[in-house]
Amino acid sequence: MRGIALSGEIRFLDTTLRDGEQTPGVSLSPEEKVAIAGALDALGIRVIEAGSAATSAGERQSIKAVAGLGLDAEICTFVRAKASDVDLALECGVDSIHLVVPVSDLHIERKLRSDRETVLQTAVEVTEYAKDHGLLVELSGEDASRADQDYLSTVYQAGIEAGADRLCFCDTVGVLVPESAERIFSRLSTLGAPLSVHCHNDFGMATSNTIAALRAGAAQAHVTVNGIGERAGNTSLEEVVMVLASLYGIDAGIKCSDIYQLSRMVSRMTGIPVAPNKAIVGENAFTHEAGIHVHGLLADTSTYEPMSPETVGRKRRIVLGKHAGRASVELALKEFGLAVTDQQLAQIFSRVKELGDKGKRVSDADLQTIAEIVLSVQKEPKVRLEELTVVAGNTVTPTASVKLQLNGTEKLEAGTGVGPVDAAINAVRRAICSVADIRLEEYHVDAITGGTNALVEVWVTMAYGDRKITARGADADIIIASVEAVIEGINRLMQLEEEKANAAV
Ligand code: MN
């Protein structure tokens, strides 16, 4: 595949705010849409589909807010083939409309209860109406992959004559394969208007089909951040961008190093987690464990990484499982910025092995503690828990108060939550929020033995900026164990941040 040139400039229409927002359970506020649109624009996205104007007054408020930002990107809204939808789009002050008309007989007859001729006529009328009102029109065939391709061409041709600026082919239920995408787009690219490709991921083929379409002449790819969207989602922005950049050597004008940050932002605002094994932006995409791979990585990171994590704004993460070899330990230390002698490495390695033999997972916090002991550079913790009081029951709001020593000063805070653990962690978070914006990303509890008096072990994944660590707390009291884990995580992150700042000086 490498070396096969794609012709012309490739543009992206990002539909995270429209098709992405159609993910079950997702609803973005105007402020969130504005924030995401700003980030998409800064990334280099050329067209932002900000929503669907006919949905609601609230949705129009969001679209208006995005259109009012004065971004470089063209701001677009989804409309159906109705003049009244176009009027609503005009109300929002957008640059363009994504005018979607069903083109498969299945959609025309079963969904619309209409016929081909009426659909064609309406498409033409609404295109003309929108053009008359100064809008750019991207005329889109819904369910185009299951449509009679001759009818589809007729619709497109009529659309061009009515003034449509671009055409879009929607693989609405994700049934294209790269071969059919290539055949279809080769044929359509002779129509004489720039062509978009809009794919869904029902068979996990969205990225492959989008690339095939681009290779066959499509000029614009519709994408969403993290591939969110209805059902199995849409083509993922980060995948197409990185396939083009890394595998085809094509610069589509996207600032790749901001991809991860945008991915986190969208995941946070939509509440849709990213699968750990998701390409490019998944938790494990640049995480390494097995000893032999890490040995290769230590010699040359490209042995087991097809691109460097920094390319997409990430960091390599080394996880020490029970198979951890000396090389993994050395690489993990290196990622912490700790240089060790062979002798120190041997000592650290044997302590890691001791923990591993006891069946313990060795967290990066454990490794750092061991390294600090061996290197005798253990630092005073910045945050220390002095008091914790929790009230919970069936008729009270779970409430916690904490007294912390924070950089040597006493800090008293209270918090509420859905349960006592949540309340306690919220209180701690409020106490430290003035010092650092630390996020709790994952929380996991293991009961080490059976019984209600068992020792529980709490694992947390915490993040500060783009740095992520895991930390652990163990106690017979689940609330104490949780707060211990969170405070340990905070201390680690603050120390790492301080080391980074010192190194930068
Ligand atoms: Mn769609």
Image: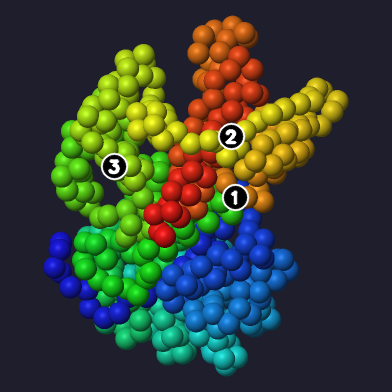
- Does any portion of residue 417 appear in the rendered image? no
Q: Is residue 92 above or below residue 447?
A: below
Q: Say which residue label 1 marks.
A: 436
Which residue is painted at 25% across and 59% down in the image? 178
Q: Say which residue label 3 marks.
A: 339
Q: Judge the density around disc 2: few (<14), some (14-19), many (≥20) Cα neighbours within 10 Å.
A: many
Q: Judge the density around disc 3: few (<14), some (14-19), many (≥20) Cα neighbours within 10 Å.
A: some
Q: Judge the density around disc 1: few (<14), some (14-19), many (≥20) Cα neighbours within 10 Å.
A: some
**Is label 1 or label 3 in front?**
3
Q: Which quadrant of the figure has residue 398? A: top right
Which residue is painted at 13% across and 68% down in the image? 3
Q: Residue furthest front?
A: 376
Amino acid type at circle 2 is Ile
**Could you say which is closer to the camera, residue 9 or residue 299?**
299
Q: CA distance from mark 2 to mark 1?
A: 12 Å
Q: CA distance from mark 2 to mark 3?
A: 26 Å
Q: Earlier in the sequence, mark 1 or mark 3?
A: 3
At mark 1, the secondary structure is loop
Amino acid type at circle 1 is Ala
Q: Is residue 441 left or right of residue 394?
A: left
At mark 2, the secondary structure is helix
Q: Say which residue label 2 marks.
A: 487
Residue 18, which numbered label? none
